[in-house]
Amino acid sequence: MKALIFERNGEPSEVVHWRDAPDPTPGPGEVRVRMLLAPVHPSDLHVIRGRFARQRQPELPASPGSEGVGIIDAVGNDVPRTRIGERVVLLDVPGTWREQIISPADRAIPVPEVISDEDAAQALINPMTAWAMTVSEHQLGCGDWLVQSAAGSTVGRLVLQIAKVQGFRTINLVRREEQVAEIQALGGDVVLCTADQNWPEQLKTATGGNGIAKAIDCVAGRTGAALARQLAPNGCMLVYGALSSHRQSDPAAFEMPIFAPALVYSAAEVRGWFIFSWLARKGPSESGQMLRSLLDGIARGTLKPPAARRYHLDHAPEAFAAAESSAHDAKPLLAFAEL
Ligand SMILES: NC(=O)c1ccc[n+]([C@@H]2O[C@H](COP(=O)([O-])OP(=O)(O)OC[C@H]3O[C@@H](n4cnc5c(N)ncnc54)[C@H](OP(=O)(O)O)[C@@H]3O)[C@@H](O)[C@H]2O)c1
């Protein structure tokens, strides 16, 4: 079989190569999955560059890739043979950019037939992030308010879909004026544009002067700091990204200056959030159950991952470039079977 492999950290288009690799054999409790599609997330490119969370940097050589969809084509001798032929998504089995991958059987989650390969391939990371932060961590229910930054991001749009189902309301930040109407049309209750210098005042008005009870932020930097400054008494903000630092070499862009008195006097909390820590904390049984619920939501049409575009492996560098381009028209998917 063949696999996309990197032997050293560096620019993905230079260090990732399509190489021969031995066919893997599933051991006890394992299945072998013939991969169909795997997305290229910006975080996968950070792994290749050696700039991702240390605990997620694989020993090299390795295949990148953090999720995907495929078909079980072999099983360990204690796994029912009836699983052969099942279409599955992988629950935190890293290294998905390869034709065949070994997965623990309980981390290969069956996909309902009505779901397209494109939607299944991206069912884990962004939908789970949106769902876990809002429903599991913040426990948002009917009538609650959430403030979110980068509302136009994939995660942000999924949050808006979850808000409709759970009945919570949203105050959304975007950085471009053109996105205001778009996010309103997707159900954002209040949409503010951070290009308007006055947005922190507008936010104060939008919260009725009561401050922010619950927020999620993936921009950090000055935007995240301004949000933290408006946290309500006992408010909580989950920081899950640092987009203001992307493609910048200035170390200051990675910082988020917190105004200490506001935090102290409101006894508020600003906490980091990372899907892989969360999945590890939940374990495969509970997180597998959550992934099944997300797949049900996708099957029912209440949750819709973004549009996707398939890239043949000969065009992998184009997929890498698309993953980081500012035109977010389609999630790039690497296609391991014929297009
Ligand atoms: N912690 C976790 O476990 C976890 C899990 C999933 C995702 N994430 C993080 O969540 C973030 C969003 O991911 P995604 O896949 O949803 O992103 P995405 O679809 O690629 O969208 C990025 C969005 O962020 C906006 N943006 C980019 N740079 C910005 C900046 N400096 N200030 C304000 N807005 C900015 C873009 O706006 P334009 O449209 O104007 O370009 C775009 O709407 C990323 O940082 C990702 O790493 C974290």
Image (cartoon, rainbow, N blue to C red):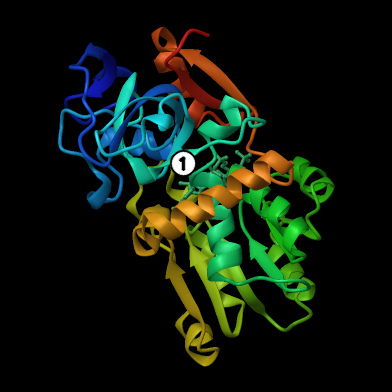
Estimate the x, y position of residue 38 in percent, counting from the top left: 45, 27
Q: 263 or 109, which lies in front? A: 109
Kind of element beneath mark 1: strand
Estimate the x, y position of residue 99 in percent, counting from the top left: 34, 18
**Residue 335 appears left or right of 99:** right
Query: Does the Cβ of the disc 1 residue fall within 8 Å of ligand 1?
Result: no
Estimate the x, y position of residue 2 in percent, counting from the top left: 27, 13
Residue located at (64% from left, 46% from top): 296
Q: Quadrant of the N terminus?
A: top left
Q: 319 or 33, which lies in front? A: 33
Residue located at (57% from left, 26% from top): 117
**Quarter location, residue 164:** bottom right
Give the residue type at disc 1: Ile
| Residue projecting furthest to the bottom | 265
**Residue 58 appears left or right of 317:** left
Count all numbered tags in the image, as a single digit.
Answer: 1
**Quarter location, residue 236:** bottom right
Q: Quadrant of ligand 1?
A: top right
Estimate the x, y position of residue 185 in percent, counting from the top left: 84, 46
Residue located at (15% from left, 32% from top): 60
Residue 223 in view here? no
Q: 84 or 249, which lies in front? A: 84
**Residue 305 appears left or right of 43:** right
Figure check: 330 above or below 247: above
Figure check: 46 above or below 218: above
**Quarter location, residue 113:** top right
Residue located at (17% from left, 25% from top): 7
Residue 260 in view here? yes
Instruction: Give the residue pinned by disc 1.
Output: 109
Figure check: 81 above or below 259: above
